[in-house]
Image (spheres, coloured by chain):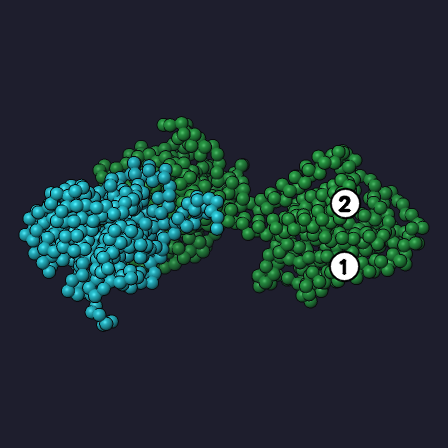
Amino acid sequence: MSLADNIKKARYRWFPDHIVGEVLSKSWIDNAIPFTIMVIVVGIIGTLLPNFFTGSNISILARQYGELALVVLAMTTVILVGGIDLSVGSVFALGNFMMLYFLNLAEFSVTQSALLVVLICGSVGLVNGILVGYLRLRAFLTTLVTLIIVRAIVDLLLLEFAQDMSMSFYSSPLWDLMGLGSVWVFPFSFVVLAVIAIVAHITISRSGPGWRLQAIGGSRRSAHNMGLPVRRIVCSAYVISGMLAGIAGILYASRLSGAGTDTGLGLEVLALTAAILGGNSLGGGRGSVSKALMGTVTILVLTNGVLRLGLNSGSGPMVLGLALIFAVFVDVRWMKNRHKLLSKVYVSPTLMEMPKAQSTEDGPFEINNRLSDVDVIALGEVESPEDVILDEDDNLYSGNRHGDIIRYFPPDYKTHEVYAKIGGAPLGMSFDKDSNLLVCVGGMGLYMVAKADRKVSLVTDETNRSMFSIVDDSRLRLADDLDIAPDGKIYFSEATVRYEMHDWPVDALESRGNGRIICYDPATKTTRTVVRNLVFPNGICTAHDGKSILFAESWACQIKRYWLEGPQKGKTEIVLDKLPGYPDNINRASDGTYWVAIMGMRSPALDLALKMPAFRRRMARRIAADQWLFPNLNIGCVARFDDSGEVIESLWDRYGKNHPMITSMREHKGWLYLGGITNNRIGRVRLPGREESWTGWSSYWGAKSGRKS
Amino acid sequence: MMKLLPTGFMDRFLGRGSAALTVPPLDGALKPNNLLEELPKGIAATAPDDIVLWNDAPLWSDAGKLVSQGGVLVEMSSDITALAVCGSNLAVATLQDGLLLLDSALQPITPEWSAPIQNITALATASDNDLWYCTGSETCTPTEWRRDLMEMNRTGHVGRIDLTTGEVRVLKRQLGYPAGIVVLPNGHVVFSETWASHLVEMSPEGKVLGHVFDEIPGYPGRITRRIGGGYWLCIFAPRSPLVEFVLREPAYRKAMLKEVAPEFWVAPNYRSGASFSEPMQGGALKQMGVLKPWAPTWSYGLVVALDADFIPTSSFHSRTGGRRHGITSSMEHDGKLWLTGRGSGEILNIQLQTEGSKT
């Protein structure tokens, strides 16, 4: 073993490649670029200005930040719904003026004045909202008009009342607190912002109204088609925008107690730049409060910095303009390329050394033709019967890919009926003590079909989230097979947490331990993951003595045992490895041994590729999936093994004529029933010399209980 | 435009041009059909390779034997790799003894060659004493063509032999497995450069004049004349994006050559599907018991009719999952096209439609 090989092994063992893709698939990764820009800008300006990081400077900035961020939030709300609000600056000025007017001339209290101002500014927003939302005018032009008109009104009012206002000076403890005071070390405006930002964040990211807002921004027409009240929501976004701008105006009034013609001038450009620089998409539908806040930090520091560095008078707007065009550029490029990047890095194969397989030339796996004279059931009438099972009355059940459970009637199984409609692809099945049918459904979870009324009910579709997982792995993506322990606990396998059912080939390409064994306890109705990081755990079967469960790890070509009780409780050990193919479902045999379906065979070229993860990664990127090297699932066999892991026999259909591929098998009264996920048939073959009365259900729940080992 | 970087480097960086993994589609005149697959059962053979017209009847090679419809005529000491009729004599290329010349009674009359000739893949006669030949590779015999492909060798050459003097002249070297050659009416030759998937026209002096047919979606082999003008081209194996990809992955390719048995390589073949240990590609996964005919495959049956300008006009196919794969040579005679089907081990013949009649 060379050093290079060892380094390669260690690298794949310890470096979690798959995390890169998972991080990129999180929605918060959109924040990465704005966050970096923010850190860089703060870093540069902070170093250039000598006393930037002093307490007093931070405090002054934080007070301004509170006001500006509220205006940016106002802008963000409207951008999210797919519009733009240019009137925020004028409304801000109006709020500022009205607040001072109410306090100084109308002599209202601070609370009354503030409420009135919020109402007035909200009504300006309402005008915008009605024009844009209900009358469907262009947001840009409409709010430009509002900008001009409201600015004109403020100027007129200033002309009328400025002199009177400057004569009086309002003062009250609350007003002073708002303007100059702090809550602990935080300026009042900052605290107001914090409260509003938290509420807004929860609303946008975690509530129905917020989701609807983003849905409309993402696609107005689709939102309309799905029945959302588009007009009302668009209108209300402008009202909220107006109110937020009003609150910012109040805070500004409290800080400076003065109204001038230049109040809030150009604020709309500042707010727009901040919102876009923070990563809110100008097209609508994508954005968040945190993005708005980050963008505001960047812009505030940038404009303040340029001002205090004493650059030429034109340089401030210049910096702003450059920042805006940069932000728009990044927005467009990121939106365009993010999913491309994700699709390139998500698939992350790992190094897997396959042991030399047991021979199929001789020994128990020697190829034979014992399945060539299989009785074929429901040929062409069933598609994808992954698992088959029989009840005590000899009825045969299977799933199909249309999402039903089909029941076939004995003795010849020529007729069948839809037993239950599930809605997802049924995979592994099992009968519980009361003959209720439990079934794993790909993409949906664990379901139960009641014996009495065939009612389909959800048993569980989530488990506890792993401590250190990046993506939320609590939801079941590919529940595969199940079995029930003597104490009634249901153990089931989830083949992979990274892919959906029909993407199983990609999981095979990765061959990482992406799967897990999960236990559902009917007594407490809780679901817990018991074994993690398994390589496509597939079939699962309770041992004959009920003290352990056996499960197959398909891509690892091995069968493992998980101890439920005894000295080894909670531990996992290998029972059978070096299989020549990929094991699928495991079920009990009548003589105390186990049947395992080998769903496909290994090939040397693929085994070699498994040692070369980088090769597989490039293969996944560069050629289409139908050209990838796959596990060969076109031929398989059924094998029987005992508790010690000794393979006793195997049954093959050498030419794949009657029963091409096999994912499951059940022994029942001297017959073996075969299911296969890519088949259009169920097979049945007579097993000579087996116990004629043995059934699966009685082995688990019958009076004498088929425990022999 | 000024080239700052070599094309190969830029291609690899951008994954285009020579680094692209795409394979030309079977389209136009190469649109798939089932004509080869639907042919009646042919004459059984173990490893048929080349077929020629000898004494007005088909004569083909089957491993080391020369066979006609009447039965085995003569057996050589090693496998025959190419045949050509030179007037009343027969040129026979063999694995171990190189090029042999037999007279009309099939008795050896081989002259002394001025240079040893090995690994001959194709022969073509310009006149009774003037023979063109293709050596596929200096290191791999014609039976090891898959190894030559996967080793990415470019050691083949095309040469010319004077049968009276035994003088051998090599006219073009460093070719990617030339495996078919035909003499044009104007004295030029066209040979197939198999690993480059194109046909090259060359003057009798060895000057390359250009590619007459390129971007072939398979590996072109022997070329023979059609009666009435034009040519038949046997494409003995399909190209596949996975093989193109593996060829650009040196580490995997070398490990595969070293560790994996040749019959289980990721490489094209004359026949496939016999063993589950062969590599399988995603699209070849059977659904509801059916293997789709457009699924990726390691072997394919394809004979193309080319006009006098080497533009394809029609084709005969045996698709994925079929048996008539790996057609290695063709010979038109008396309204029939005779084919050696290496994949199915058969000598096939197709009744050609007469000129002008269309059904």
Q: Nearer the viewer, residue A558 or B179?
A: B179
Tell me if A627 is positioned left or right of A532 in this view.
left
Q: Nearer the viewer, mark 2 or mark 1?
A: 2
Q: Is residue A506 left or right of residue B343?
A: right
The amino acid marked with disc number 2 is Asn
Q: Residue at the location (31% across, 54% down)?
A: B209
Mark 2 and mark 1 lie on one chain; the one further toward the N terminus is 1
Amino acid marked by disc 1: Leu
The image's mark for residue A147 is 1
Write down which chain is painted cyan: B
Question: Image quadrant for the C terminus of chain A?
Answer: top left
SS state under label 2: loop
Task: Determine contact: label 2, label 1, CB under 8 Å.
Answer: no
Residue A312 has which mark? 2
Q: Which chain is green?
A: A
Within 10 angstroms of label 1, few (less than 14), some, or many (20 or more) residues?
some
Disc 1, SS: helix
